[in-house]
Image (tube, rainbow, N blue to C red):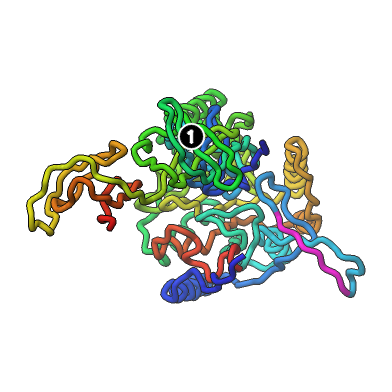
């Protein structure tokens, strides 16, 4: 191995812009009385999500007589929700998270997430606040806000909420040369995720951010099911210039449903030959004790800097990407 | 041959696709935050030379292709095959017309070429970047023209035709870049 690549991959100019953006984010939330918090990077449990992989490490010391597995968090969500349940009020966090098995020009395994929670907000309220933050930081025009169903109808003329529509989307992917990726895949959500990534995303949010809301209920993650249409959930994502920038929920507060989702994740993991993951019981206890009605969002800060400077690769906004850390 | 998982994909990796050995030119992971990851790769098919895009579900495996590059010296052609030899083991191997292709015009006896072997059979022959060849035919140039404006076609001993400066004459040996097919210099 060569160690001559010791220099940072970001320019000084970019690092100054990065520092300035952090300052402006803190000012944005200070103006709105949102409290900055820090929660642990290492926790006794990780996530059960099928497509997220926790890196782990082992710790020992007083109180931990034997080396014990700790999970590097993929987002500070569970800990921040414990703060909300404990009565924090509105909170935000800017911190490092780690996602194993994600390296590309848009992904670094260790990256910086901006995550915030707003008691009393709905997903629509939080979409408006996120849009405002993007306008302040990037000088963007007001975002387009469309439903998941509407973007698929617009771009592919197919309804992602019906089996017939999903079959059409699958055929379209095959026609356009993406068939190999689906050769061993029957799961409708994977078909939709591929179509979203390679067909829909390039067609939306190019000149101004695009918020896609009402994701299918099967991809609800930690969002509550939609109050008027049980086929979809109060989950939204923000896309801009080819980057998936943020993911938000009008949060599920029901501990019972949350446990059922974790258990379903683990059942799907087992079905796919993946190891089931321990469930974060402290998070569920917090939900049981009662979490205020709130909306929350995680936004990739490094990608925000990429958009600010027009970077092609995430390396351009990091001091030292993982492959030269 | 081993299988490769998408995590092992990188530029230069040789894999089988559509029954043909291919080389990966570019590999990019696409992953929605909460969704399945995919690898989008650009590959060159080594038999047809075609460049195509493929998408795989991350974690899937594909069959590797037993493709290796070896350095062999060109010996001679018997009209049907072109014969090469390993200068260390003296082992000989014959490449057919499909493998040699257009590069036949750059084959010079004793020159060391790169042969791409698939399952031990040559599928491509790459000559050295520079070869020296004698001019067997060209128009007599104007005396005193050294600027080389425009130049003229010259036929080389292998049949290759390259543009040369006007002052270069029949019987002279020139150096040619085989990648571009361009004249580089005269060889004293």
User: On the image, numbered disc 1 is attached to which residue?
Assistant: B83
**Residue A84 falls in image quadrant:** bottom right
Q: Is residue B43 above or below residue B150?
A: above
Q: Is residue B1 above or below residue A249?
A: above
- A71 part of magenta stretch: no
Q: Is residue B124 above or below residue B97?
A: below
- In screen coordinates, is B72 left or right of B185? right
- Outermost right residue: A65
Q: Where's residue B138, x and y in %?
A: 17, 42
- In screen coordinates, is B188 left or right of A228? left
Q: Quadrant of the N terminus of chain B?
A: top right
- Magenta segment, principal secondary structure? strand
**Residue A271 falls in image quadrant:** top right
- In screen coordinates, is B154 left or right of A137? left
For image coordinates 62% across by 47% down, the residue present is B8
Q: Nearer the viewer, residue A126 or A201?
A: A201
Q: Where's residue A290, x and y in %?
A: 74, 57
Q: Quadrant of the C terminus of chain B?
A: bottom left
For image coordinates 12% across by 54% down, the residue present is B149
- Outermost top residue: A164
Q: Where's residue A105, x and y in %?
A: 50, 55
Q: Secondary structure at mark 1?
A: strand
């Amino acid at each position: 191995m060569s160690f001559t690549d010791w220099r940072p991959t970001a320019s000084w100019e970019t690092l100054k812009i990065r520092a300035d953006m952090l300052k402006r984010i803190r000012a944005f939330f200070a103006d709105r009385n949102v409290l900055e918090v820090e929660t642990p990077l290492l926790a006794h449990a990780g996530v059960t999500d099928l497509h997220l992989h926790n890196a782990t490490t082992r710790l020992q010391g007083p109180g931990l007589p034997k080396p014990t597995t700790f999970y590097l968090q993929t987002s500070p969500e569970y800990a921040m929700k414990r703060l909300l349940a404990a009565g924090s009020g509105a909170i935000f966090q800017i911190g490092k998270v780690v996602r194993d098995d994600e390296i590309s020009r848009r992904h670094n395994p260790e990256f910086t997430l901006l995550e915030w929670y707003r008691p009393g907000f709905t997903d629509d309220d939080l979409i408006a606040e996120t849009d405002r933050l993007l306008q302040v930081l990037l000088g963007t025009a007001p975002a387009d806000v469309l439903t998941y169903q509407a973007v698929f109808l617009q771009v592919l003329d197919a309804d992602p909420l019906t089996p017939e529509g999903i079959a059409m989307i699958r055929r379209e992917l095959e026609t356009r040369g993406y068939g190999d990726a689906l050769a061993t895949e029957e799961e409708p959500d994977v078909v939709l995720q591929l179509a979203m990534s390679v067909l829909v995303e390039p067609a939306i949010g190019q000149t101004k951010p695009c918020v896609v809301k009402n994701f299918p209920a099967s991809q609800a993650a930690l969002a509550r099911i939609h109050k008027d249409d049980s086929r979809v959930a109060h989950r939204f994502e923000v896309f801009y210039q080819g980057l998936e920038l943020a993911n938000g929920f009008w949060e599920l507060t029901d501990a019972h449903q949350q446990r059922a989702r974790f258990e379903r994740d683990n059942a799907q993991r087992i079905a796919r030959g993946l190891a089931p993951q321990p469930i974060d019981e402290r998070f569920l206890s917090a939900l049981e004790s009662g979490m205020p009605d709130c909306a929350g969002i995680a936004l990739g800060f490094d990608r925000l800097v990429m958009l600010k400077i027009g970077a092609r690769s995430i390396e351009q906004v990091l001091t030292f990407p993982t492959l030269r850390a | 041959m081993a299988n490769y998982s998408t995590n092992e994909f990188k530029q230069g990796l040789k894999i089988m696709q559509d029954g043909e050995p291919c080389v990966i030119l570019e590999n990019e992971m696409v992953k929605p935050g909460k969704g399945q990851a995919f690898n989008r790769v650009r590959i060159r098919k080594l038999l047809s030379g075609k460049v195509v895009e493929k998408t795989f579900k991350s974690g899937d495996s594909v069959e590797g292709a037993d493709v290796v590059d070896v350095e062999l010296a060109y010996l001679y052609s018997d009209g049907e095959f072109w014969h090469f030899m390993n200068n260390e083991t003296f082992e000989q191997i014959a490449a057919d017309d499909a493998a040699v292709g257009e590069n036949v015009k750059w084959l010079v006896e004793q020159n060391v070429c790169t042969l791409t072997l698939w399952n031990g059979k040559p599928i491509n022959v790459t000559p050295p970047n520079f070869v020296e060849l004698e001019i067997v035919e060209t128009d007599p140039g104007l005396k005193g023209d050294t600027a080389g404006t425009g130049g003229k076609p010259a036929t080389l001993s292998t049949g290759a035709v390259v543009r040369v400066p006007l002052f270069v004459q029949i019987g002279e040996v020139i150096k040619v870049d085989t990648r571009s097919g361009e004249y580089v210099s005269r060889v004293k």
